[in-house]
C-alpha cells in the first residue's frame, strides 16, 4: 500500500469520525483531517500550507458574505414579499407559469449566494405557506422548496461548487452562464410541475389574496425592486461591456445592498450584517476547511493518486463512479465533494469541453445537500413546512435525483457538441 493511499485513508477516516462520531462541525473535521494527513505524510505541522489553503477560496467567501447581506436587505425591506405577492396576482390565471415563477423566486437566493440553505430558509420560508394555500400538500411543497434550493445553488450567477472545481485546474469563472442555465432551468420547470401542477390546476386566487403580504408594494410602490434591478443590471454590464471596469460580484452586492436600504421598509444595517454573516458562517468555515484539505492532499500526493485512479478507470465505469461517489461524499459537504472528487473527475473527462463538464459535475455535487445524514436542503425544507421527519421528502427525491444524474451525464457525454451553442465568453 502506497504512502499516498495511507494518507488518504487516514484523512477520510479522521474526517468521517469527526463528523459522525465526535459530532464536530464539517469545517473543524476537515481541518483536523488536513493536520493529521500532513503529519502522517511526514510533513509535521505545515503552518504555511494550512494558511495558504485556508485562503484558497477567499474570493468565493467574499461573494457569499456580500450576497447574503444583499439577500437579507431585500428580505427585510419587503422586496421579497412584494415580489411574491406581485407574481401571484399577475399570473394566477395561468397556474403552470405561476408555479415556474414561484420556483424562480425560491431559487433566487441560492443563485446569488451559491447556498441551497440560503434559498430554503429565506425565499422557501416565504413561499411555503403560499404554495400550501394554493392546495399543494406539505410533502410536495417541501420537495419543491428543496429542489429550488439545490438548483438555485447551481444556477448562475454564483455557483460555488463549479468555482471550486474550476479553481483546481485554474479555469476562470467565465463562460459558465449558458451551461448552468441549460442544466438547471429545464429541471426546475420539470420538477415544480411534477410536484405541484396537479394540485393547482383549478387555483382560486380570491381564496388566498388576503393572506399575501401586499403592504410593502402598497407603501413603497415599484421602487422597492430597484436594488434587484441594480444588482442584475451591474452583472449584465460586467458581462456585456468588457471596456467597463469590472466591479466584481462582492462590490455589486455591496452597491445593491446600499441602494436597498433606502427603497423599502427600514433596514437595520448592523442587524442585517450580523445576521447575514452568522447565517453563512458554517458555509464559510467549510470553504476554509476545504481549502486546507485540498492543500494537504496536494502536498502529500493524495490528489495525484485520486486523479490517476479516476483517469485509469474504463469509460463506462468512470460515469458510474461519478454518479455514485460524488453524491455520497456530498452527504458530508457538497463543497467538499466538488473539491475532493470534482476536480479529479474533471481531469478524467478532459477530452470534452471543460466548462460544460465542470458545470455538469457541479450539478451532481449538489445532490449531496439531499443525502443523509446531513441532508441540509431536505431537513430545512421539512422544517419550513412543519414536518418533523424529512424521510418522506427523501423518498420522493429519488426520481428527481436520478433525473439530475442522467441529465448531467448527457451534458458530459455531448459536451463538445453542445459547447458552441451554450458557452459564451
Image (cartoon, grey):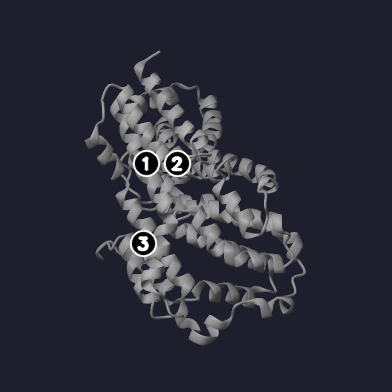
Res 316 quadrant in image: top right
Q: Is residue 35 above or below residue 393?
A: above
**Which residue occupies the foreground of this view, 364 or 373?**
373
Res 245 quadrant in image: bottom left
Left or right: residue 195 versus residue 68 is right
In this figure, which residue is indicated by the disc labeled 1?
289
In this figure, which residue is indicated by the disc labeled 2?
26
Is residue 303 at least partly visible in the picture? Answer: yes
Marking on residue 66: 3
Res 384 quadrant in image: bottom right
Between the C-alphas of marks 2 and 3, the distance is: 22 Å
Between the C-alphas of marks 1 and 2, the distance is: 8 Å
Residue at image position (39%, 77%) is 261
Badge 1, how many Cα within 10 Å: few under 14, some, many 20+?
many
Residue at image position (39%, 27%) is 307
Which of the two labelled residues, at mark 2 and mark 3, occupies the earlier sequence position? 2
Between the C-alphas of marks 1 and 3, the distance is: 20 Å
Furthest residue to the bottom?
A: 219
Q: Position of residue 236 (x, y in %)?
A: 37, 65
Residue at image position (60%, 49%) is 378
Badge 3, how many Cα within 10 Å: few under 14, some, many 20+?
many
Which of the two labelled residues, at mark 1 and mark 2, occupies the earlier sequence position? 2
Q: Nearer the viewer, mark 1 or mark 3?
A: 1
Q: Nearer the viewer, mark 2 or mark 3?
A: 2
Left or right: residue 176 versus residue 135 is left
Furthest residue to the right?
A: 202
Give the secondary structure at mark 3. Answer: helix
Q: Are marks 1 and 3 in contact (CB under 8 Å)?
A: no
Q: Position of residue 206 (x, y in %)?
A: 73, 79
Q: Position of residue 22 (x, y in %)?
A: 48, 35
Left or right: residue 297 versus residue 214 is left
Amino acid at each position: 500500500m502506497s504512502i499516498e493511499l495511507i494518507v488518504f485513508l487516514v484523512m477520510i477516516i479522521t474526517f468521517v469520525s469527526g463528523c459522525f462520531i465526535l459530532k464536530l462541525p464539517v469545517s473543524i473535521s476537515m481541518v483536523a483531517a488536513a493536520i493529521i494527513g500532513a503529519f502522517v505524510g511526514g510533513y509535521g505541522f505545515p503552518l504555511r500550507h494550512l494558511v495558504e489553503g485556508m485562503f484558497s477560496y477567499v474570493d468565493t467567501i467574499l461573494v457569499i458574505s456580500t450576497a447574503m447581506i444583499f439577500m437579507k436587505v431585500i428580505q427585510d425591506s419587503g422586496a421579497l414579499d412584494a415580489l411574491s405577492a406581485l407574481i401571484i396576482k399577475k399570473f394566477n390565471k395561468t397556474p403552470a407559469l405561476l408555479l415556474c415563477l414561484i420556483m424562480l423566486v425560491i431559487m433566487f437566493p441560492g443563485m446569488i449566494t451559491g447556498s441551497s440553505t440560503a434559498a430554503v430558509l429565506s425565499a422557501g420560508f416565504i413561499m411555503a405557506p403560499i404554495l400550501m394555500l394554493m392546495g399543494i400538500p406539505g410533502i410536495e411543497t417541501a420537495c419543491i422548496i428543496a429542489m429550488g434550493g439545490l438548483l438555485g445553488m447551481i444556477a448562475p450567477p454564483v455557483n460555488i461548487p463549479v468555482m471550486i472545481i474550476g479553481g483546481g485546474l485554474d479555469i476562470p469563472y467565465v463562460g459558465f452562464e449558458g451551461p448552468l442555465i441549460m442544466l438547471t432551468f429545464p429541471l426546475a420547470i420539470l420538477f415544480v410541475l411534477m410536484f405541484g401542477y396537479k394540485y393547482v390546476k383549478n387555483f382560486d386566487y380570491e381564496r388566498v389574496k388576503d393572506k399575501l403580504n401586499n403592504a410593502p408594494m402598497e407603501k413603497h410602490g415599484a421602487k422597492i425592486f430597484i436594488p434587484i434591478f441594480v444588482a442584475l443590471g451591474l452583472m449584465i454590464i460586467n458581462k456585456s461591456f468588457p471596456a467597463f471596469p469590472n466591479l466584481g460580484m462582492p462590490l455589486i452586492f455591496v452597491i445593491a445592498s446600499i441602494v436597498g436600504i433606502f427603497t423599502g421598509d427600514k433596514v437595520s444595517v448592523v442587524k442585517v450584517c450580523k445576521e447575514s454573516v452568522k447565517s453563512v458562517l458554517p458555509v464559510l468555515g467549510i470553504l476554509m476547511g476545504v481549502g486546507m484539505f485540498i492543500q494537504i492532499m496536494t502536498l502529500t500526493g493524495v490528489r495525484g493518486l485520486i486523479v490517476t485512479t479516476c483517469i485509469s478507470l474504463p469509460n463506462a465505469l468512470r460515469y458510474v463512479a461519478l454518479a455514485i461517489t460524488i453524491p455520497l461524499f456530498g452527504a458530508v459537504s457538497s463543497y467538499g465533494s466538488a473539491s475532493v472528487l470534482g476536480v479529479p473527475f474533471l481531469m478524467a473527462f478532459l477530452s470534452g469541453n471543460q466548462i460544460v463538464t465542470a458545470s455538469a459535475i457541479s450539478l451532481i455535487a449538489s445532490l449531496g445537500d439531499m443525502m443523509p445524514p446531513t441532508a441540509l436542503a431536505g431537513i430545512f425544507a421539512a422544517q419550513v413546512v412543519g414536518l418533523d421527519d424529512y424521510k418522506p421528502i427523501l423518498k420522493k427525491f429519488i426520481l428527481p435525483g436520478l433525473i439530475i444524474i442522467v441529465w448531467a451525464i448527457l451534458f458530459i457525454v455531448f459536451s463538445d457538441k453542445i459547447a458552441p451553442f451554450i458557452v459564451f465568453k
